């Protein structure tokens, strides 16, 4: 049974509020929590759809939290869902800035706080790695995808190419490598649909011709 739009809006607001309020380390840290919430728990997105969201939020300019909220919210509940997810993503940050900003300087000077954040950063790295392994396994990543990933890593680390340039370069490489394969898939899908549509049209013609044909004479009418 489908949830109403209001229930989905409330779920989007609560989910993004909780994720944003308890995320330390930036937008990338949100991604494993989003996968757990929207793919595994609520099942609003499939694994493929979540990967598309990851690609979009990293390709578009702006904050990852806001971009993902608008994209996921619109996917789940249309424009109202995008608005609810957007509010859920920004309200915690506003509250934290207003309430905790005076305490930030004091917290930074506290040695225990520094020790806690060191452990948190390690846990965040583990979450991001877990997300990468999960998604790579589910989409069936092969040697081509591994080559793309390693090439991007080498270009960023060794060649010092800015990460922003990696996205259009990867898109161009994807068109060259996968373009012909995707075209063949699209052509095969069109060919498989044509016989089905032709059969349906022939069946419709036969039905119409049977309706238009005059009724056959009965045995009594045919006798002299």
Image (spheres, rainbow, N blue to C red):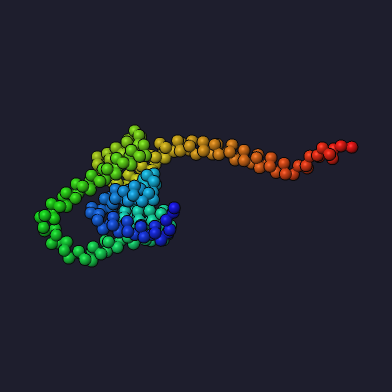
Where is 16 relative to 183, above or below?
Answer: below
Percent coordinates x, y for residue 24 in the rendering: 23, 54
Q: Looking at the image, which residue sits at the far front?
A: 220
Percent coordinates x, y for residue 14 in the rendering: 32, 59
105, 192: nearer the viewer: 192
Residue 52 appearing in the image: no
Quadrant for the C terminus, please: top right
Percent coordinates x, y for residue 50 in the rendering: 36, 47
Residue 158 appearing in the image: yes
Left or right side of 5 for 187: right
The residue sitting at 44% across, 53% down in the picture is 1
Left or right side of 172 for 199: right
The residue sitting at 14% across, 59% down in the picture is 107
The residue sitting at 32% across, 56% down in the picture is 15
Q: Looking at the image, which residue sits at the far left?
A: 111
The residue sitting at 35% across, 37% down in the picture is 141
Where is 191 relative to 50, above or below?
Answer: above
Left or right side of 57 for 99: left
Percent coordinates x, y for residue 88 in the rendering: 32, 60
Q: Looking at the image, which residue sits at the far top?
A: 143
Where, by quadrant of the figure, is residue 93 drawn? bottom left
143, 171: nearer the viewer: 143
């Amino acid at each position: 049974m489908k949830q109403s739009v209001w229930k989905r809006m409330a779920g989007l607001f609560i989910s993004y509020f909780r994720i944003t309020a308890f995320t330390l380390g930036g937008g990338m840290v949100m991604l494993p929590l989003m996968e757990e919430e929207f793919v595994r728990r609520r099942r609003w997105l499939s694994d493929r759809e979540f990967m598309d969201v990851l690609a979009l939020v990293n390709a578009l300019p702006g904050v990852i939290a806001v971009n993902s909220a608008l994209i996921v919210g619109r996917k789940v509940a249309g424009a109202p869902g995008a608005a609810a997810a957007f509010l859920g993503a920004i309200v915690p940050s506003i509250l934290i800035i207003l309430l905790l900003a005076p305490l930030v300087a004091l917290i930074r000077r506290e040695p225990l706080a520094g020790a806690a954040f060191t452990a948190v950063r390690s846990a965040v790295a583990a979450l991001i790695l877990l997300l990468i392994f999960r998604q790579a396994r589910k989409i069936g990543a092969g040697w081509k995808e591994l080559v793309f990933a390693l090439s991007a890593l080498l270009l960023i680390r060794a060649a010092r190419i800015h990460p922003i340039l990696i996205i259009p370069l990867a898109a161009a490489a994807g068109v060259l490598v996968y373009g012909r394969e995707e075209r063949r898939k699209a052509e095969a899908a069109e060919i498989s649909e044509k016989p089905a549509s032709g059969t349906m049209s022939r069946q419709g013609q036969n039905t119409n011709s049977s309706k238009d044909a005059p009724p056959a004479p009965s045995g009594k009418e045919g006798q002299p």
